[in-house]
Image (cartoon, rainbow, N blue to C red):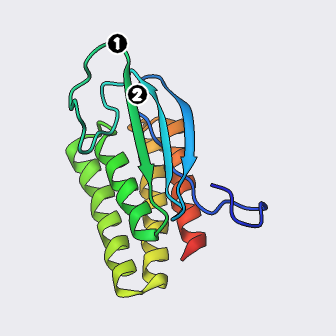
């Protein structure tokens, strides 16, 4: 999402899985939440409070909502990590780090949140180097973490 000045990124998010996804509509509500509607054929597309939890056909429709507060962005990152299909240990490491970011944000400790986001970025890079995470997904996660750091 572009900031109010139109010169920078207010926040960004990655929505998708290992297959193909495309957005057909994007909308913004008065509170600043972004809604995205489209179609996906990824078996690991992130689903929360889904009307139809498992994939129901070759393509399924989706509607996603992205929050504007740092805590909502961290929550979105956690959902993305959960849907990546990583080995349990790798998923735990990333989730644990994001939980520490969340706790720091809740305490109002932006310096600790920023430090833990740097740790998260390095963990994502390590997974990419070890070929456990594809470069496009890793790069998107890093971009989200950096955009969040800019907002702290």
Query: Mark 1 = which residue?
Result: 58
Asked whether, in this view, residue 116 is left or right of residue 94, the answer is right
Label ID, residue 134? none
Query: Mark 2 = which residue?
Result: 18
> Where residue 56 appears, x then y in whole percent?
25, 18
Asked whether, in this view, residue 4 is left or right of residue 118, the answer is right
Seen in the picture, residue 140 relative to 75 is either above or below; the reply is above
Distance in Å between CA atoms under marks 2 and 1? 14 Å
Q: How many marks?
A: 2
Asked whether, in this view, residue 55 is left or right of residue 34, the answer is left
> Where residue 152 appears, x then y in whole percent?
54, 77
Identify the image quadrant of residue 127: top left
**Mark 1 crowdedness (10 Å alpha carbons): few <14, some 14-19, many ≥20:** few
**Mark 2 crowdedness (10 Å alpha carbons): few <14, some 14-19, many ≥20:** some
Identify the image quadrant of residue 4: bottom right
Q: Nearer the viewer, residue 8 or 65?
A: 65
Asked whether, in this view, residue 93 is left or right of residue 14, the answer is left
Seen in the picture, residue 111 relative to 81 is either above or below; the reply is below
Task: Confirm or deny contact between disc 2 and disc 1 (CB under 8 A).
Answer: no
Q: Residue at x 41, y 56 (%)?
A: 123
The quarter of the rendered structure image containing the N terminus is bottom right
Q: Secondary structure at mark 2?
A: loop
Seen in the picture, residue 20 relative to 64 is either above or below; the reply is above
Q: Residue at x 39, y 26 (%)?
A: 61
Q: Nearer the viewer, mark 2 or mark 1?
A: 1
- Between discs 2 and 1, the one toward the N terminus: 2
Q: Residue at x 49, y 84 (%)?
A: 111
Identify the image quadrant of residue 92: bottom left
Seen in the picture, residue 30 relative to 107 is either above or below; the reply is above
Q: Nearer the viewer, residue 128 or 112?
A: 112
């Amino acid at each position: 999402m572009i900031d109010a000045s139109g010169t920078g990124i207010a926040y960004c998010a990655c929505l998708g899985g290992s297959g193909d996804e495309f957005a057909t509509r994007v909308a913004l509500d008065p509170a600043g939440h972004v809604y995205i509607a489209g179609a996906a054929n990824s078996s690991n597309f992130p689903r929360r409070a889904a009307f139809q939890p498992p994939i129901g056909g070759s393509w399924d429709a989706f509607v996603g909502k992205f929050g504007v507060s740092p805590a909502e962005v961290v929550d979105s990152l956690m959902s993305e990590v959960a849907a990546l299909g990583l080995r349990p240990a790798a998923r735990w490491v990333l989730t644990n780090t994001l939980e520490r970011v969340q706790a720091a944000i809740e305490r109002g400790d932006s310096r600790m949140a920023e430090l833990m986001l740097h740790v998260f970025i390095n963990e994502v890079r390590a997974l990419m180097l070890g070929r456990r995470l594809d470069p496009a997904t890793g790069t998107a996660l890093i971009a989200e973490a950096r955009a969040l750091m800019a907002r702290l």
